[in-house]
Amino acid sequence: MNDFLKIEGLTVEYRSGSRRVHAVNDLNLHVGEGEALGFVGETGAGKTTTALSILRILPNPPAKVLSGKVFFKGKDLFQLSDKEMRAIRGEEIAMIFQDPMTSLDPVKTVGDQICEMILLHEHCSKKEAWEKAGDMLETVGIDRDRAEEYPHQFSGGMKQRVVIAIALSCNPSLLIADEPTTALDVTIQAQILELMKKLKREYQSSMIMITHDLGIVAEICDNVAIMYAGGVLEYGSVFDIYKDPQHPYTHALFDSIPDVHRDQDRLKVISGLPPDPTDIPAGCPFHPRCPHCTERCKTEKPEAVYLNETHWVKCFLMQGRGGESHE
């Protein structure tokens, strides 16, 4: 497989005095060209930290990459100079941040903010950049005449569209979307998702969709990584994960979704709480909340067991079911 983006052994922690927050722990993942990967998991699973690591925009301090490599089109991003990395951000890899309210400069028109990105990465005149900024607004469903307006003149959903227009203005080959619909109402969420599906089709960009919403993943993504305590517990195609989930945590996530076809007095919840990131449990990190926990789970880390070429699970329940195990 052509690994367009490949993460090897990524470990990131946040430091505050003597406290060490283990945000990402020995993460290994890949994203193919033109593929959309969904990062799914509860708050604190390490999804956003992984994305910020790819772009090398982790706050330092307190964040520190302890080990690992991130290859993009064959280049190790951690080995590039700051100048080389700035050229990649925006032009090759772009990110849609979670909160559009804080992603835009309140004292610049939206047109100027899109132009700024275009002029930073493309050799063109201000007039050409302004024309392209108008084109990008129309791409995301906003009239180009509104380029002269300021962010406060837009609704939350429109602001998010502007943020998407900025991210797409240089035709990036990898788009990272961090909970792009979280702050929006249901109607606007649906519009933004339709827009992202359309853009994925038209631009053929690779995409990482960070979310806790399994419905969004089903609509947009090709593959899914179920994240917990800074690592991946289960990985597979959307079909694998939705039709044949295997890890107890994956089952628990699906069980917590309301079923519109059944009468339910109350929703199922996952027992316990995600682990304290300053004190990740030994063995399988999910074992304190797992109904199938054994003594082995408390002391040993399970290796990935491949159930088919693309679907693997880190759980001792799977041993003997799949093909070979991998680190």
Image: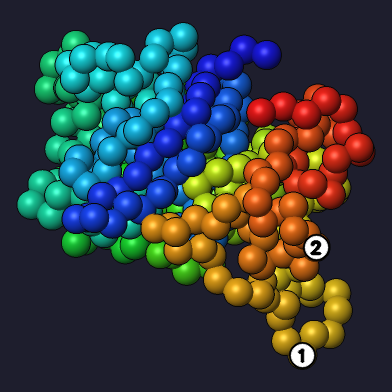
Task: Give above or below for 173 relative to 151.
Answer: above
Measuring 46% from the left and 53% from the top, which residue is drawn there?
179
Horizontal side of residue 268 vs 109, given as left or right: right
Q: Residue furthest right?
A: 321
Q: In which quarter of the image is residue 158?
A: bottom left
Crowd rating for badge 2 (residues with CA inside 10 Å; few <14, some 14–19, many 20+): few
Indicate the quadrant containing the C terminus: top left, top right, bottom left or bottom right.
top right
Up the image or down, 324 lies above or below 15; here it is: above
Colour setting? rainbow
Residue 111: percent from the left, percent from the top?
Answer: 20, 39
Question: Which of labels 1 and 2 is toward the front?
Answer: 2
Quadrant location of residue 204?
top right
Q: Is mark 2 on a helix, strand or loop?
A: loop
Tell me the tag on residue 156: none
Residue at image point 36% right, 53% down = 21
Which residue carries the number 1 mark? 265
| Residue 160 screen position, x and y as percent | 36, 52
Q: Residue at x 66, y 75 (%)?
A: 271
Q: In the depicted view, which residue is nearer to us: 18 or 245?
A: 18
User: In this view of the protein, can residue 280 be seen by the observer?
Assistant: yes
Q: Which amino acid does label 2 sit on?
A: His
Cα distance in 3D space between marks 1 and 2: 26 Å
Q: Please state the horizontal and vertical placement of residue 115, each as a whole percent of the image.
A: 19, 31
Q: Which amino acid does label 1 sit on?
A: Asp
Q: Which of marks 1 and 2 is nearer the N terminus?
A: 1
Mark linked to residue 292: 2
